[in-house]
Amino acid sequence: MKKPIRVLILTDGIVVKKWVADIVKFVNDSSSFEIVGTIVNESKNKSESSILYRSLRYVDRKLFASSNNPFQNIQLELDANFIYYTKPKQKQYSDWLDEDCINHVKFLEPDLILRFGFRILRGSFLNIPKLGVWSLHHGDNKVNRGGPPAFWEVVLKEPVSGVTLQKINEDLDGGEVIGKAFTKTDSLSYYRNQVQVYELGVQLFKEKLSQLITNSLKTEKPVFNFYDYPLYKNPSNQATLKIFIIYSFRILKKAYQDFRYEQQWIIKHSKKNNSETSLYRFIDLIPSKGNNWADPFPIIDSNTLYLFAEQIGKDRKGKIVCFEFDSTSNSFCDPKVVLEEEYHLSYPYVFKYDGDWLMMPESGDSNKLKIYKSTEFPFQWKEEKIIFNDKKLFDVTPFEYNSKWYSFASERISNAISPNDYLLLFELPEGPIGAWKLHPSSPIKLDVRGGRCAGKIVEKDGKYYRVAQLGTPKYGYAIQFHEILKLDAFSYDEILVDTIYPYWDSKSLAIHTFNMVNGWHFVDCQRQIKKKFI
């Protein structure tokens, strides 16, 4: 039996923030780890935040509250006999552990140290554990070092906010990168942005610890590791006042846009069988005012083209509709509702399996993933099987590759993490209707840039491409094509090869689904239109 990995915890107290407690609990609950001790920093650091900055953050928390709170205080449930208290030697931003503390750490013989406290640690202590000292930096260490966490991304309107897990060295936020994760920056709230970044950091930490157990952990070793951005710090009173003014105008601008304009999703398609790729030439399918059509999935059956799509009305509940193409008029007939549930449906993934037409629509908000079978194609469907009854899975995309079935799916693992960041890969050894199991390489991504599928797998010139959403600077902003380089029982690898942006029209805001069949190309497009006031 493999010996458990010996883990030492560093904190600033036995009462910690919930995000820290969640990671420690994950380690403590795993038989693959053994917590051998906790080093508690008794030094008290004075706040360097200006009055106006603290006031700004307070107002932000009140205006944009979150149902998740990774910052609530939690007392660690650890044996008091395993806690060692110390006061490090301190300089301006750095901490050195004294000789007694270092000897104590050596006596414990940790394989891995997890840092959730202290400041910049320096000295020989960093070289004691063979697996290193792991620490979360709540930012992308290539573009944001210093602090406050997840704040300057909002101020500077960065499209993504990152979190970096690294083996620390004496260079601030410049250690060997174990992994990164990215989510869309919340442009209106510093607090909400911080919540989602910290929650994503917990998940990143858990995933990398799990990979450590299975010997599948890979770290990033760039040839050069230069940092060409400033060292960010808490803003002064003068800087905070300027930020507050910009922040207020940003909120007022958003309120005006919401009052004056509305967004509508429409479907666009190429002309009949001509494989058109210039988006400005596409033909529009526009629903009536107050309705939206999105997620187009075309199917050809008995030489007839059908188009399945999501339809959303004023009640905001999605249902699945089907358009039939009339070859006489060279246009699509009005759609018919073919599937409706009490909950939201979208992304009508229709495919043929063992001679039957199946549909696997997205129903993530219901905690269910169902497969439906057509009893009279394309307008009659019945529930065939519940694949999952306890998972929030989004835009599930099954496909056959090298005579084996797989499926991508994005999971919402907490309310603070969007369904656009966390991409899983499943193996379907018994086909789509059989049992599903998680592929060893999951998660494929912890990144809003490609972390959610945007249509069926595309096969072209003998190569396969995963179609994905670029979920920033807004939801469903653009479409990415990732070439599948490797997929087997143990590994998965892909590379980004192309992107479709909504640039063809000034009114176009986003494009988030692509599908094709027999020379037809289909996309959906979100456009901005003026509201009409009586």
Image (cartoon, rainbow, N blue to C red):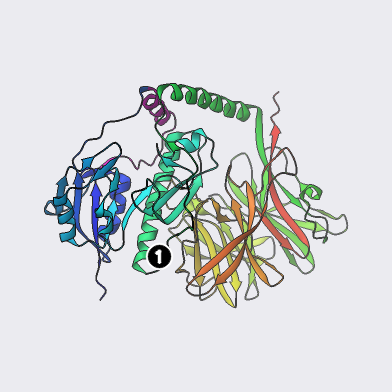
Image quadrant assignment for residue 527 = top right
The quarter of the image holding the C terminus is top right
Q: How far from the left and from the top, in percent, is residue 272? A: 83, 58
The magenta span reads: 52-74
Q: Seen in the image, is 436 located left or right of residue 120? A: right
Residue most toward the left? 81
Q: How far from the left and from the top, in percent, is residue 476? A: 61, 47
Q: How far from the left and from the top, in percent, is residue 68? A: 38, 42
**In this orientation, which residue lies closer to the viewer: 90 or 15?**
90
**In this orientation, which residue lies closer to the viewer: 360 or 175?**
175
**Above/below status of 435 relative to 87:** below
Tell whether position 224 is magenta: no
| Residue in the image at 50% along x and 33% along y | 155
**In this orientation, which residue lies closer to the viewer: 442 or 353?**
442
Residue receiving disc 1: 217
At label 1, the amino acid type is Leu
**Which type of secondary structure does the marked residue at label 1 adopt?**
loop
Tell whether position 72 is magenta: yes
